[in-house]
Amino acid sequence: MARALVRLLTALLLLTPAIAFAQKAPGLALTPPMGWNSWNRYGCQIDQALIEKTADAMVSSGLRDAGYVYVNIDDCWQGARDRHGDIQPDSTRFPAGMKALGDYLHRRGLRFGIYTDAGDKTCAGRPGSQGHEFQDAAQYARWGVDYVKADWCNTGEGAAQRNAREAYATISRAIAASGRPMVLSICEWGRNQPWLWGRDYGHLWRTTGDITNCWDCMVGHGNWFASGVLAILDQQDAVRGYAGPGGWNDPDMLEVGNMPTPNDDRSHFAMWAMLAAPLIVGTDVTALKPEIRAILANSRLVAIDQDKLGVAAMKWIARPGLDIWARPLADGRWAVALLNRGDAPKDARIDWSAMALEDNLKGRRADFRAMTYSLTDAWTGQPAGTTATPLQRMIAPHDTLVFTLAPA
Ligand code: GLA
């Protein structure tokens, strides 16, 4: 009897740390998450019918099968808390409730994502999770949620601002306590260097403020501003070393399909793939133009993004108006992207044998004098010569060429 009691107590003691420190679900987001989110295209104008027809379109367009499995409902789905304090959806917009919506997604082989905020209100003024973290995570688990994006609005100002790390640690523990594995997307806009601590609690963390659908602009919104693709891209090289399996830098969701020109769409997608960024589609997939579908579903670009090494690209060469980015891939391969930042066509040349391609951060080196690589154009799948001869290409304004290099 006494021995049984000791055994029981020992087992409990051994379990305690596991319970107290249980945190983010392991084995999730080993490659950058892929899916769709309502915000970039629809903002607050969302409802059950939109999410359902989007889910149908994710399947019929082939995007689900290309890897885009998460369907994430952003801000404005919330109604009020009920008398137990449990969060409930806005019942006019989501009349069947969130469990039914989750089932709808799961039946189609999709996963269910939802949005909340670390503060007491979301950015759009709906109820946030502060003080209700465990209760909300338990509710999400009952609904079958697979992915939680947690925003950073209304977390206080100046000295009274919440400690970001502590706030996201609480959400992470709440998800763990719910017993349902969920991807945690930390959306605190890079304010508190989430790349330094985000991996402990979540699976992706925003590195910047919000994206907007322009090439090179800043759009003011009073006390904050949104940035175009180039401004966001230019903030990624410095933090590239923090991305990797299980934890990704998030340069924000895709505006592919919403950009002013097809070249802008192509470059935005190519560079996000080079960055090993989460690929969260933000356009109307129920009316997807064939050329936008072709960009999003390009299997070679997606494979670069999803490469199992999980190393984000470095800015290898910067010339006036021309960026050349490179990232090592699994099996001794590389990806190289040439981005024309400017408004005029640009002649680009890479004389491989005259340079070294070296990723010091990750200890990878391509010595083109000692080894020849064959090039494949990632957009078309066509062979594009070898590194034995220089690469020479004219790049259209705002366009990006991508090549994969494989040991010949
Ligand atoms: C913030 C986030 C966006 C979006 C909106 C919703 O701006 O950064 O991605 O979720 O809030 O209100």
Image: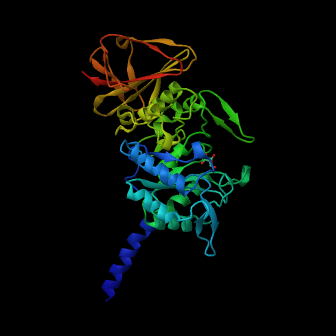
Q: Which quarter shows the C terminus?
A: top left
Residue 211 horizontal/vertical position (percent): 60, 37
Image-based side of 297 in relation to 235, left or right: left
Please tell me whether residue 380 is drawn above or below residue 55 in the rendered image. above
Instruction: Farthest residue to the left: give it.
Output: 408
- Is any atom of residue 35 visible in this view? yes
Please tell me whether residue 135 is drawn above or below residue 369 in the rendered image. below
Q: Decide which of 327, 73 is in the foreground and name it.
A: 73
Image-based side of 401 in relation to 167, left or right: left
Image color mode: rainbow
Q: Decide which of 23, 1 is in the foreground and name it.
A: 23
Q: Residue at x 40, y 47 (%)?
A: 59
Q: Which quarter shows the N terminus?
A: bottom left
Q: Residue at x 44, y 33 (%)?
A: 290
Q: Decide which of 86, 316 is in the foreground and name it.
A: 86
How many marks the image carries: the answer is 0
- Is any atom of residue 245 visible in this view? no
Residue 173 horizontal/vertical position (percent): 50, 62
Task: State which quadrant residue 255 falls in.
Answer: top right
Image-based side of 1 in relation to 75, left or right: left
Residue 16 horizontal/vertical position (percent): 43, 70
Please tell me whether residue 6 is drawn above or below residue 167 in the rendered image. below
Residue 342 horizontal/vertical position (percent): 57, 18
Image-based side of 209 in relation to 158, left or right: left
Please tell me whether residue 47 is drawn above or below residue 59 in the rendered image. below
Instruction: Farthest residue to the right: give it.
Output: 222
Q: Decide which of 339, 381 is in the foreground and name it.
A: 381
